[in-house]
Amino acid sequence: MPKIITLKEKWDLLVNKLTNQFADGDELNMDGIIYLIGVQELGQSHPEFKKDDKVNLMHIAICKLLEPYGYYEFDYFDDDSWPHYKTITELPNLKPGEQTVLMKEAIITYFEALNYFD
């Protein structure tokens, strides 16, 4: 496989791999990928999550993704084994495009740490 250099190339590869693995024909978007990360980080299988649970799963994922950047730090697991994070540094005010780039970089870094691209 040729070496992937750009963020866009890495992102496209990740989207294709995750779509093939988890989606039934519909390409996953960033929110879908963040949701998958939240489910992975929770580590519990549920046949179906409630709407509030889905929001919380996405929050878990965002905290996990931005932890290496110094924005969040793992704090504890609650009685239901859900992870909780504390804010270390407030997120900077970013334009929407800058937010997208930050999240894509964080997501790619997350999956690289799992050797998902190998």
Image (tube, helix red, strand yellow):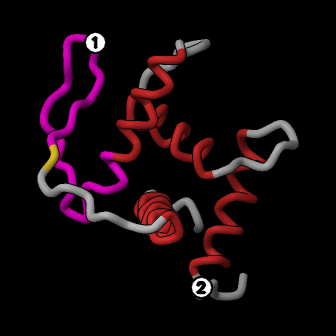
Q: Answer above or below: position of 80 versus 11.
A: above
Badge 1 is on which residue? 80
Instruction: Please give left or right for residue 99 compared with residue 72 in the image.
Output: right
Provide the secondary structure element on which disc 2 rests: loop
Badge 2 is on which residue? 6
Instruction: Please give left or right for residue 43 compared with residue 20 in the image.
Output: left
Q: Tell whether position 99 is magenta.
A: no
Residue sitting at x 27%, y 19%: 81
Q: Answer above or below: position of 20 versus 116.
A: above
Q: Answer above or below: position of 89 versus 101.
A: above
What is the CA distance from the residue labelled 1 to the residue labelled 2? 40 Å
Q: Which residues are magenta?
A: 63-86
Residue sitting at x 45%, y 64%: 99
Q: Position of residue 7 (x, y in %)?
A: 57, 78
Residue sitting at x 77%, y 39%: 23
Amino acid type at image mark 2:
Thr
The crowd level at tag 1 (other Cα within 10 Å; few <14, some 14-19, many 20+) is few
Provide the secondary structure element on which disc 1 rests: loop
